[in-house]
Amino acid sequence: MNNNICHTTYKYKICVSGAAETDFLGDLRNKVFSLAEKLGAEIIKHDAVMVDGATTGFPFWASKGAKNAGGIVIGLSPASTEKEHINYFKLPTEYHDIIIYTGFNYSGRNLLLVRTADAVVFGCGRMGTLNEFTIAFEDKKPIGILQGEWETDELFKEMIEKSHRAQEMEGKIVWDKDPKQLLDKLVEVIKKDKENNNHQTLFKNQEL
């Protein structure tokens, strides 16, 4: 029996959520894609695994940045097979190490996507991004919001303020315009969240 098996340290899984269709960005598209690439690279530099919806647009460019940085990218597809993913949903397979075909369409995929991750980072987005944000909020996941010249970050801010539940996420949502600074903040939130979860689990086990 080999007792010298090397066990790697657990890596955080950070999900990137953002617009798959980006025509609404107009002249901002190239700037946004560049930010997405930097965001993906920073996830890897922070020793995490990137997770996304195996889709186009903002997440696609983030996955490109993550792979170019030498990282691991896992995608969750709305399709049930690779054939359906490519031919029906018209989604890419590039820049991913693993794609899991959920077969749950977009809404079901979004739920699994958020719950797979330890934290979710949000860039520019549309309705699907808002859906993933509400799931992350309800699940009390650590959230990072990339601020920029789009409207999504302001919309998130308004949603949080008008939800009358902002106190539930106190200390769990971080904001920044710079991908590196955002990931620095988010990783600290993940660490605290893990410590709290482990403490609660230990406490419950002691009660049993």
Image: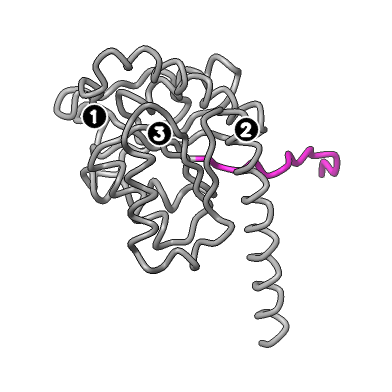
Dot 2 or dot 3: first in sequence order is 3
Residue 63, above or below 126: above
Helix, strand or loop status at disc 1: helix
**Part of the protein shown in magenta:** 1-14
Report helix, strand or loop for mark 2. helix
Kindly identify the amino acid type of the residue bearing the numbered disc 2: Gln
Q: Quadrant of residue 71?
A: top right
Give the labeled residue for mark 1.
85
Whether tag 2 and tag 1 are in contact, CB under 8 A, the answer is no
The colour scheme of the drawn protein is one colour
Q: Does residue 6 show up magenta in the picture?
A: yes
Q: Label 2: how many residues lie within 10 Å, few (<14), some (14-19) or many (20+)? A: some
Please give the residue where the numbered disc 2 appears in the rendered image: 181
Front label number (2 vs 1): 2
Amino acid under label 1?
His
How many badges with numbers are in the image? 3
Residue 16: percent from the left, percent from the top?
44, 36
Q: Badge 1: few (under 14), some or many (20 or more) residues near its Cα, within 10 Å? A: many
- The percent coordinates of residue 86 (x first, y second) are 22, 23
Mark 1 or mark 3, which is nearer the start of the sequence?
1
Which residue shows up at 16% across the image and 23% down it?
87
